[in-house]
Amino acid sequence: MQKPTDVGSNAAFLAVHLIDAGDVEFGGAASAKIKGDLRRLGIVEALARRAGIIAFEGEMNLILYSSHGGRITVCVDRGAIEITVEDDGPGIEDIDLALTPGYSTAPDWATDLGFGAGMGLNNMQKNADGFEIHSHIGSGTRIVCWIARGEHDAA
Amino acid sequence: MEFQEVARLVEGEVLVPPPDGGLPIDRAYAADLLSDVLALTEESTTLITGQISPQVMRVAEILSVIAVIFVRGKHPPGPLVESAARLGIPVVVTKKTMFETCGLMYQNGVRPCRNRPMLVRTPPSSPST
């Protein structure tokens, strides 16, 4: 799907969440806040749920895999919800492989917490109407997901 | 089934009751792997799990989980219970296994939530010798 508009330039709502690498204790807290914010903005449950899932998968990826953490940016305008997840490394060597359900490089401690099943990136893509991923070894990863807002969606 | 009936059925201890007293439970999903819950459920549901990491309630909040049943006697830590109470998500803990819990609930009319099982990918077969 074509990205509806340049969401960032006309955002009615903008939030940036900084995520620390390895911060398992608070893992998912930013995403829960994002979902709550979207509901308070009047976004319908079905879309807020999808946005929350995208943010959560991105947040756990930053915690589990990034070198120095990263950030999640949420922009909302009349046409779409856009979620950007970015870090500065280490980068993904083989994006197609990383998008394959079940492929994982997660450490055992992540699996003990209930994560690292190798479905995160795939699940982000599944819940988005549009999905872009750019990654380079050494410079990091940037994922942009957007969800089109329907006519019944308020705000 | 009503939430309180489910709790009695699994001989569970209610840690957080439904905010309004009653809560119908008609569908459920069972997994320890939160990745599965996030990726494979297609609607809000009751969650049956043995996972007691802090992320359980955050996943529950994002997915609008109706209620959480902790199995195998996995007692959730205090902050997790407080979080459930704050979110208004009822919680019960049972000593029964996940299999027993699912079986009892299924026998009493609870059905799987809409879900999307992962496609099994078989590796290329090696040439026969």
Image: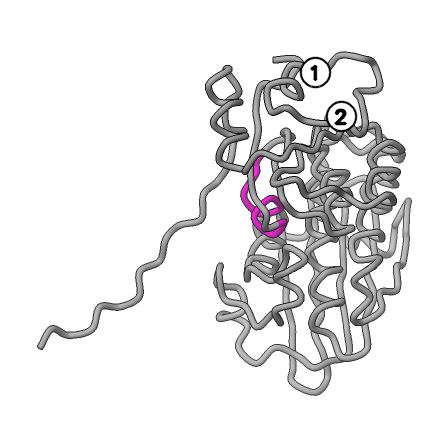
Q: Quadrant of residue B124?
A: bottom left
**Which residue does the image show at 73% across and 80% down from the upper left?**
A89
Q: Nearer the viewer, residue B11 or B64?
A: B11
Label 1 Cα neighbours within 10 Å, binned few <14 / some 14-19 / many ≥20 = some
Question: Looking at the image, which residue sits at the far left?
Answer: B129
Measure the C-alpha gap from mark 2 to mark 1: 8 Å
Location of the N terminus of chain B by quadrant is top right
Q: Quadrant of residue B10?
A: top right
Location of the C terminus of chain B by quadrant is bottom left
Question: Looking at the image, which residue sits at the far bottom?
Answer: A138
Please tell me whether residue A51 belongs to the stretch shown in magenta.
Answer: no
| Residue A3 x %, y % | 67, 52
Give left or right: position of A154 versus B28: right
Region of the chain picked out in magenta, as a range: B34-42
**Which residue does the image show at 61% across and 31% down from the upper left?**
B43
Helix, strand or loop at disc 2? strand
Give left or right: position of A48 versus B109: right
- Using the image, determine if residue B60 lies above or below residue A106: above
Label 2, on which residue?
Answer: B14
**Which residue does the image show at 78% across and 70% down from the upper left?**
A22
Q: Quadrant of residue B30?
A: top right
Label 1, on which residue?
Answer: B4
- Using the image, determine if residue B2 lies above or below residue B27: above
Q: Nearer the viewer, residue A140 or B72?
A: B72
Label 2 Cα neighbours within 10 Å, binned few <14 / some 14-19 / many ≥20 = some
Q: Are marks 2 and 1 on the same chain?
A: yes
Q: How is the image coloured?
A: one colour
Mark 2 is on which residue type?
Answer: Val
Q: Is disc 2 in contact with disc 1, using a CB cutoff of under 8 Å?
A: yes
Chain that bears disc 2: B
| Residue A10 x %, y % | 88, 50
